Image (cartoon, helix red, strand yellow):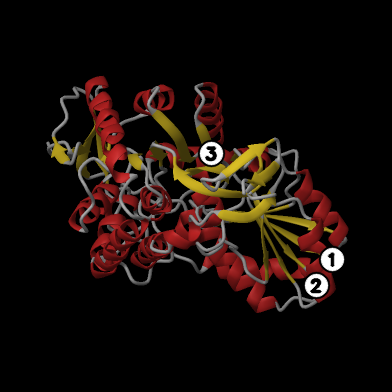
C-alpha cells in the first residue's frame, strides 16, 4: 500500500498522524496512486497557529516584494507546466490537452497576482473639508482558507492562494481529497519560489477538516468551490462564525441557438462545451435551447457527438476521459435512466460506454436527450457528466424566460449573427457570465468570475478586482495637521500674529 502523502504545516512537509487514509485512484484503472490523510485536530491547530504567526510578519513585507514572489512563482509554473499537466491528468483522468488548459488558466491568475501593487491602491482626496484630507488604505485580512474541488486541481487553487498571499494574507489550502497530488506539487513549487515559512499551509481530508477551518476563531475568510449542498453548508456555517465567505456552487448552463447562427460553429462549440472534460466543469453547457428552425440541426448534433470517443489521458485521439469516481458515474447513470423514465427522448446513450484496455474505468459516453422539460430531474439537477439536453422554443423571449426561470445563474451563451438579438439577450438574461458566440464565457483574471443566483453565495467573487477586495479590507483615514503657531476653534483656524 502506498504511503500517505505529506501535509505542509509551518513550512515543513510532515507525515500525518491520522489513522484515516483516503485512497487516491486513477479513474481509468482504479489503481491506487496515493493515500491522503484526514488531518487531525492537532495538525489543523498547528497549521492555523503557524499561518496566524506568519501573517504578522508577511503583512509588513513591501507589496513590491510580494509581487516579485508571484513573478518567480509563475516562472516556475511555466517551467513545470507539462509535468504538472501529466500529474493532473493521471489523477483526474482528464486528457493531456484538458490538463494543460487547467494548469495554464491557473498560471494566468498568478500573473495577475504579480500586479498586486496596482490592485491594492487606495483612494485619496485633499480638502474634503477645510484643511482636512481623507485617504483609504487597503489592508490584508489575516488567515484565509481555500476549499477546492476535484475538477480543476490546478486552476482553482491558483485562483485563491496566490492572490490572497500577494495581498498580504497567509493561507490554508484544503484541496479535494480525490486528487491532492497536483495541489501538493503546486505548493512545493511555491516554496521553491521563495515563499516564507508559514505563509502557505496545505491540509488534506474530508468534511471534518472543512468544518474545523470554517469554525476556527482565527480564520478570517473562506473561499469555496464545489457542489450546491456543500456550498450552502460552507456559506451558512462560515458566516455564522463571522467569516467572510465566497461559495461557488452548482450550475445549469444554457446555450441559446438562434436560427440565423452559423450551423457548424454552433454544433462544434456545443459538442466541445458539453462533453469536454467529461462534462465535469461548472461552466459546461448542459442545455441547448434551439429557437425556431434551428431545431433541425439536432440530427447533425447527434452525429457529431456520436463521433466522440473517450479514452486514457495519454491517448491523443481521446476527446475526454473518465468521470472522477465510481460514485460520480453512478450518479450520472441514475439521471440518464431517470430522464428516459420521465419521457425524454434519448438520441444518444453513453451509459454502456467501454474503452478497450480499461475495463474498470468510470466511463460514460456522449449522451444526448431531446424533448426535455423543466420539470424533469434531468433538467433540474446538475448532471456533471457528458450529457447534453435539447430544449426547443419558439422565440428568443421564450429562451430568455426559460433561462431566467432556472435557479442557477453561472453561465450562458447565445449564438447568433444579429447584434440586436445578442444585445437584448445579454441585457435581459439573469446570469452572471454571458457569452456571445462564445460557448464557455469564463473571464480572464483581470475580470472576475461572476456567477449569480443559486450558483454563488456571497458578495465578492473570485479573482480580478473583486478577488482582491475579498481578501482585503479598507481603512479610511481622515487627517488634519496644524501649524505650531495656530490655535483651532471649532472649524476655524486663527493664526497668531
Whether residues under marks 2 and 3 lie with C-beta atoms below 8 angstroms apart, the answer is no
Who is closer to the viewer here, 292 or 189?
189
Residue beneath label 1, please?
Answer: 292
Whether residues under marks 1 and 2 lie with C-beta atoms below 8 angstroms apart, the answer is yes
Q: Quadrant of residue 75?
A: bottom left
Q: Label 3 crowding class (10 Å Cα cut-off): few <14, some 14-19, many 20+?
A: many
SS under mark 1: helix
Task: Choose the circle earlier in sequence order: 1 or 3.
Answer: 3
- For the point 30% across and 56% down, the residue is 88
Q: Nearer the viewer, mark 2 or mark 3?
A: 3
Left/right of residue 251 with respect to residue 353 in the rendered view: right
Whole-Å distance between the Cαs marked 2 and 3? Answer: 37 Å
Q: Which mark is residue 57?
A: none
Whether residues under marks 1 and 3 lie with C-beta atoms below 8 angstroms apart, the answer is no
Residue 155 percent across, percent down from the top left: 40, 55
Q: Label 2 crowding class (10 Å Cα cut-off): few <14, some 14-19, many 20+?
A: some
Q: Which mark is residue 259?
A: 2
Q: Tell me: residue 230, above or below residue 471.
A: above
- For the point 28% across and 51% down, the residue is 182
Q: Quadrant of residue 260?
A: bottom right
Residue 411 visible to an observer of this rendering:
yes
SS under mark 3: strand
Residue beneath label 3, please?
Answer: 247
Q: Residue lying at the far front in this picture: please name it.
A: 497
Residue 305 visible to an observer of this rendering:
no
Q: Nearer the viewer, mark 1 or mark 3?
A: 3
Image quadrant occupied by the N terminus: top left
SS under mark 2: loop
Q: Quadrant of residue 190?
A: bottom left
Amino acid at each position: 500500500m502506498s504511503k500517505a502523502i505529506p501535509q505542509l504545516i509551518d513550512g515543513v512537509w510532515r507525515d500525518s498522524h491520522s489513522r484515516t487514509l483516503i485512497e487516491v485512484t486513477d479513474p481509468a484503472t482504479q489503481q491506487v496512486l496515493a493515500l491522503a490523510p484526514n488531518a487531525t485536530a492537532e495538525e489543523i491547530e498547528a497549521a492555523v497557529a503557524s499561518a496566524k504567526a506568519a501573517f504578522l510578519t508577511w503583512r509588513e513585507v513591501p507589496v513590491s516584494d510580494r509581487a516579485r514572489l508571484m513573478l518567480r512563482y509563475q516562472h516556475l509554473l511555466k517551467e513545470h507546466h507539462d509535468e504538472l499537466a501529466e500529474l493532473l491528468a493521471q489523477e483526474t483522468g482528464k486528457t493531456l490537452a484538458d490538463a494543460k488548459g487547467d494548469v495554464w488558466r491557473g498560471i494566468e491568475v498568478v500573473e495577475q497576482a504579480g500586479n498586486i501593487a496596482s490592485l491594492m491602491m487606495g483612494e485619496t482626496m485633499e480638502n474634503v473639508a477645510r484643511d482636512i484630507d481623507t485617504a483609504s488604505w487597503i489592508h490584508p485580512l489575516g488567515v484565509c482558507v481555500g476549499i477546492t474541488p476535484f475538477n480543476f486541481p490546478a486552476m482553482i487553487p491558483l485562483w485563491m492562494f496566490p492572490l490572497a498571499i500577494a495581498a498580504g494574507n497567509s493561507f490554508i489550502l484544503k484541496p479535494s481529497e480525490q486528487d491532492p497530488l497536483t495541489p501538493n506539487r503546486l505548493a512545493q513549487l511555491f516554496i521553491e519560489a521563495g515563499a516564507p515559512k508559514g505563509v502557505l499551509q496545505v491540509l488534506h481530508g474530508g468534511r471534518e477538516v472543512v468544518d474545523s477551518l470554517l469554525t476556527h476563531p482565527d480564520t478570517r475568510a473562506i473561499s469555496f468551490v464545489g457542489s450546491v449542498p456543500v456550498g450552502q453548508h460552507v456559506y451558512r456555517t462560515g458566516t455564522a462564525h463571522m467569516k467572510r465567505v465566497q461559495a461557488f456552487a452548482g450550475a445549469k448552463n444554457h446555450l441559446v441557438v438562434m436560427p440565423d447562427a452559423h450551423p457548424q460553429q454552433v454544433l462544434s462549440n456545443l459538442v466541445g462545451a458539453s462533453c469536454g472534460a467529461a462534462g465535469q466543469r461548472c461552466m459546461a453547457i448542459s442545455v441547448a435551447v434551439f429557437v425556431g428552425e434551428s431545431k433541425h440541426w439536432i440530427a447533425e448534433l447527434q452525429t457529431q457527438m456520436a463521433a466522440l470517443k473517450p479514452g486514457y489521458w495519454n491517448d491523443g485521439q481521446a476527446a475526454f476521459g473518465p468521470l472522477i469516481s465510481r460514485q460520480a458515474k453512478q450518479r450520472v447513470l441514475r439521471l440518464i435512466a431517470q430522464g428516459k423514465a420521465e419521457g425524454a427522448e434519448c438520441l444518444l446513450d453513453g451509459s454502456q460506454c467501454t474503452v478497450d484496455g480499461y475495463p474498470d474505468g468510470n466511463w460514460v459516453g456522449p449522451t444526448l436527450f431531446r424533448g426535455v422539460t423543466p420539470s424533469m430531474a434531468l433538467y433540474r439537477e446538475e448532471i456533471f457528466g457528458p450529457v447534453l439536453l435539447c430544449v426547443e422554443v419558439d422565440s428568443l423571449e421564450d429562451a430568455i424566460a426559460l433561462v431566467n426561470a432556472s435557479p442557477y445563474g453561472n453561465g450562458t451563451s447565445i449564438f447568433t449573427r444579429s447584434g440586436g438579438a445578442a444585445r437584448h439577450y445579454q441585457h435581459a438574461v439573469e446570469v452572471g457570465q454571458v457569452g456571445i458566440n462564445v460557448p464557455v464565457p469564463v473571464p480572464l483574471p483581470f475580470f472576475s468570475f461572476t456567477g449569480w443566483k443559486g450558483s454563488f453565495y456571497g458578495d465578492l467573487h473570485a479573482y480580478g478586482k473583486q478577488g482582491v477586495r475579498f481578501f482585503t479590507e479598507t481603512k479610511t483615514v481622515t487627517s488634519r495637521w496644524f501649524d505650531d503657531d495656530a490655535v483651532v476653534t471649532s472649524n476655524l483656524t486663527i493664526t497668531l500674529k
